Image: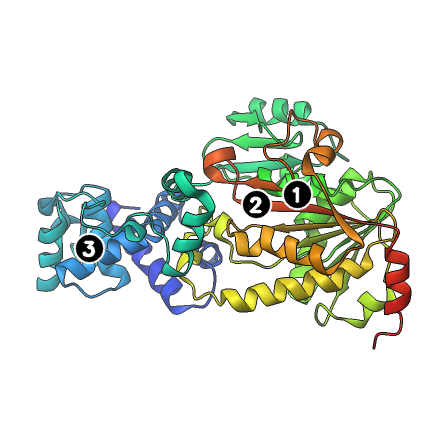
Amino acid sequence: MTPSARIQATIDILERIAAENRPADAVVSAYFRTRRFIGSKDRSEIAGRVYAVLRHHARLGWWLDRAGAEDTPRNRVIAELTLAEGVAVKDMGRLFSGDTYAPIPLDKPEEALVKATAGQPLDHPEMPKPVRSEIPDWAAASLEANFGDRYEAEVAALLDQAPLDLRVNELRGSRDEVLQTLAAGKLSVEPTPLSPLGIRVKGRPQLGRHPAFQSGLIEVQDEGSQLIALLVDARPGQQVVDFCSGAGGKALALAARMRGKGRVVACDVSKGRLDRGKERLRRAGIDNVEPKLLENERDRWVKKQRGKFDRVLIDAPCSGTGAWRRNPDARWRPIDLDRLLGVQREILDSAARLAKPDGGRVIYATCSLLREENEAQVEAFLAAHPDYRLVPVEEVWAEAVGTGPAPTAGMLRLSPAANGTDGFFVAVLERGPKAEAADAAGAEEA
């Protein structure tokens, strides 16, 4: 493809993202899936520019407003080229030539936008701090209060491109073996520093057709997400429930850690998400995961299974602030945080009933960096449930993870700036002997 054709493809994808109520990665994947003729190098450059425009959303919007330009995907690409890529005025006409597969020529307002932005830096000293940091208004105060004097470094790291991490399937091989296999295939790889099962890959190689992926030896999974599954501390023969399973990435990790012995129930309210996990289970050679479709967090199944599980993982729906590196478009989707907090409370309160008395554990996790969704939820739960106690994460880490000391004490907090992972939160809650009386009292619930 010519440089002009790649620019037009970028505009096409951004227009679809703006028009469709779907995550950007799904739109990008669908675009390339119907255009198999686009080579891997072109795909990489197109996708890279799409995500750059999304990561620069607030700053590009500020420049468009300053230049009096209409806020359209095409104008955002024009501003990205001049501000972030440094394309000169004299070269813009060549790129927007109107030739076959090239963008149509610039009109007068677009030429004015080019002149207003060419030679300018993307970051302007007059930009408000939230704009420069690409932080939406609803999250700015909470993040600043949460990070304190680390705020600037933390929000800057959220603008970086996330690494490509893999998890080794323990049922199929060891990390050392996989590292050797991938390195022999000319991939640049290294072990992740925190997860004993993780491998970090340099660049963005296409792994879908790699033998290690097709054989179920590896799965794509951020190192932080791997640590959540490890901190469940699921053991062979146990009864485990993944309450918000989605497509089953953590259920896969749990079943592998259990060596295929015992039972993992993967619950979700979406049949589509559960169905997408079935192929992953087959590829990984796992047969002890049982998908379970729930109507809602208060499904009657939860009442019937009260007190039967050794481990209950709740990877709660959340704002996704910790995953903004991977999903830059998610920053700007409308978020009803109060509604989300209510859903989290309901899920935690309901799913906690599944844990066995006297030793059953609930592992509450989010991919959020907001205290309201993390520590505050756990503190409120513990205040309302005296039969539970917080298990310091460092106690679980030593045996379940074992890679040096835990990054934080009490509850686990991970962030891109501090740990190189996505932003994650984990709290391990253990049910005590008082739970038997609580279960007996609750047995009459409707």
Numbered circle sitting on residue 424: 2
Mark 3 = which residue?
63
Numbered circle sitting on residue 228: 1
Q: What residue type is labelled 1?
A: Ile
Residue at 57% from the left image edge and 41% from the top image edge: 413
8 on left or right of 298: left
Mark 1–mark 3 CB contact (< 8 Å): no
**3 vs 368, nearest the viewer:** 368
Q: Label 3: state its secondary structure.
A: helix
Q: What residue type is labelled 2?
A: Phe
- The answer to whether one can see residue 268 in this image is yes
Q: What residue type is labelled 3?
A: Trp
Residue at 65% from the left image edge and 53% from the top image edge: 378
In which quadrant of the rendered view does residue 185 lie?
Answer: top right
Q: Label 2: state its secondary structure.
A: strand
- Which residue, as the protein is rendered here, is positioned at the far bottom? 446
Residue at 47% from the left image edge and 64% from the top image edge: 22
Numbered circle sitting on residue 18: none
Mark 2–mark 1 CB contact (< 8 Å): yes
Crowding near the residue tagged with mark 2, few <14, some 14–19, many ≥20 C-alpha atoms within 10 Å: many
Q: Distance between the residues labelled 1 and 3?
A: 40 Å
**194 vs 444, nearest the viewer:** 444
**Which of disc 3 and disc 1 is earlier in sequence?**
3
In which quadrant of the rendered view does residue 190 lie?
Answer: top right
**Which of disc 2 and disc 3 is earlier in sequence?**
3
